[in-house]
Image (cartoon, grey):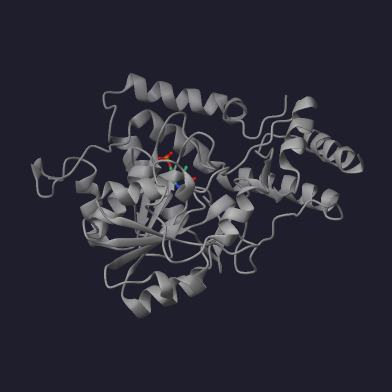
């Protein structure tokens, strides 16, 4: 069976290093927010190119705490896309703020900057730019808009750990960067974890307080909550961070193989923005007969995925609540056409070629 993503294969490739790191934590005397978390925060800030990084419990919390640190709450609005993991919108609503959604660009699947003017109100406090599938949103246009209108820019980098925009790592460009380290992500824990990056010392200090009861020296300065990161996950992430660039280049080799083999088929290949590198968290193609194609692949023991089958604003929990005056043409059209082909660092070119052959023989029929 060829899976779409395969975190257990990744464990096997770094098994000795991970087991050693995990044992050392268990034999130590600190299990939550200890030396491993502090070291991971330092390693990650250095890697991303920010003055600080803060470990939290998961990616949804990373976004919620980032917004809270910027004083976003009831009465405020945050602009983002519907074409994202539900988590992006759930995190906005967790602060009490209203999520305002805009459509995406047809080629890159990221926020359409031309729609921002219509979405802006006097209550708009921030924009969350989601770097979907492994490459950057149009950060240049979005950050010019944010500066002009004095609103904050948060990057949701949960699908693009390590990708660069004009030579800078994503997560170092907006006011705050938010990362999920869910097991399938490019930098994945063996459980839940999240990271926040910023160059702003004040924000970093506040986020550190917010993740643990709003505490400063065990006195709650802010109404906080618990979003601590544990030592086991931090130790595992430190091992995997050392391999992130090489894992991302393995994803790129596989993506280039797919593109070279399939460029003249009827399947629409993903495109990379000129200013961005791509780390192919997902390899998302567009097809017109998705259900039959998925079934055909399944018969050949290949599991493709859909990210995401239903745009957030059309899911029951959000239906008729997030809609704005802006139409969601691209988001809604793509939802029926997108298909994620198997991609993960341990996937062999031989297996990727099996996927290619299966797609080619479907196209002939
Ligand atoms: C995975 C993901 C999240 C949520 O992260 P969790 O760790 O599952 O809370 C947020 N945004 C995007 C774009 C994601 O892909």
Q: Is 196 positioned to the left or the right of 206 in the image? A: right
Position of 265 with respect to 243 (left or right) is right
Q: From the viewer's side, name the closer residue of 64 and 211.
A: 64
Asked if residue 185 is positioned above or below residue 285 in the image, the reply reads above
Estimate the x, y position of residue 175 in percent, counting from the top left.
35, 64
Q: Position of residue 272 (x, y in %)?
A: 66, 61
Across and down, in percent, residue 180 comes to 44, 43
Q: Residue furthest front?
A: 320
Q: Residue at 22% of width from left, 54% of height from top?
A: 205
> Is 223 on the left or on the right of 126, as rendered?
left
Placement of the N terminus among the 4 image quadrants = top right
Residue 166 location, quadrant: bottom right
Quarter of the displayed picture in which ligand 1 can be seen: top left
Q: Residue at x 65, y 47 (%)?
A: 336
**As drawn, which residue projects farthest toward the right?**
364
Q: Nearer the viewer, residue 121 or 218?
A: 121
Q: Is residue 43 visible?
A: no
Residue 13 placed where, x, y %? 62, 29
Identify the residue at horizontal 45%, vertical 32% (top origin). 236
291, above or below 256, in the image = above
Q: Residue at 71% across / 51% down in the picture? A: 286
Asked which quadrant contains residue 126, the reply is: bottom left
């Amino acid at each position: 069976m060829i899976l779409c993503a395969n975190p257990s294969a990744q464990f096997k490739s770094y098994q000795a290093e991970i087991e050693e790191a995990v044992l050392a934590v268990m034999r130590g005397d600190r299990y939550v927010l200890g030396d491993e978390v502090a070291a991971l925060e330092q390693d990650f800030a250095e890697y991303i190119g920010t003055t600080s990084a803060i470990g939290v419990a998961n990616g949804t919390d990373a976004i919620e705490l980032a917004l809270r640190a910027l004083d976003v709450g009831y009465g405020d609005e945050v602009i983002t896309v519907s074409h994202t993991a539900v988590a992006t919108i759930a995190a906005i609503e967790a602060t009490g703020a209203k999520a305002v959604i805009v459509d995406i660009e047809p080629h890159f699947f990221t926020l359409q900057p031309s729609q921002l003017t219509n979405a802006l109100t006097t209550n708009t406090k921030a924009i969350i730019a989601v770097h979907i599938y492994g490459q950057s949103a149009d950060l240049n246009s979005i950050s010019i808009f944010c500066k002009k209108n004095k609103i904050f820019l948060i990057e949701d980098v949960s699908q693009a750990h390590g990708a660069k925009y004009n030579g800078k790592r994503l997560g170092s460009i907006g006011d705050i960067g938010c990362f999920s380290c869910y097991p399938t992500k490019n930098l994945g824990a063996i459980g839940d974890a999240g990271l926040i990056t910023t160059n702003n010392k004040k924000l970093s200090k506040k986020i550190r307080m917010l993740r643990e009861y709003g505490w400063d020296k065990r006195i709650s300065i802010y109404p906080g909550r618990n979003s601590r990161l544990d030592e086991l996950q931090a130790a595992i992430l430190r091992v995997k961070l050392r391999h992130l660039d090489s894992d991302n280049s393995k994803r790129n080799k596989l993506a280039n193989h797919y593109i070279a083999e399939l460029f003249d088929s009827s399947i629409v290949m993903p495109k990379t923005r000129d200013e961005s590198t791509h780390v192919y968290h997902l390899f998302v193609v567009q097809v017109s007969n998705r259900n039959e194609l998925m079934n055909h692949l399944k018969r050949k023991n290949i599991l493709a995925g859909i990210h995401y089958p239903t745009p957030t604003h059309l899911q029951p929990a959000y239906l008729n609540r997030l809609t704005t005056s802006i139409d969601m043409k691209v988001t809604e059209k793509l939802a029926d056409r997108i298909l994620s082909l198997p991609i993960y660092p341990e996937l062999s070119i031989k297996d990727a070629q099996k996927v290619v052959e299966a797609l080619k023989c479907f196209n002939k029929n």
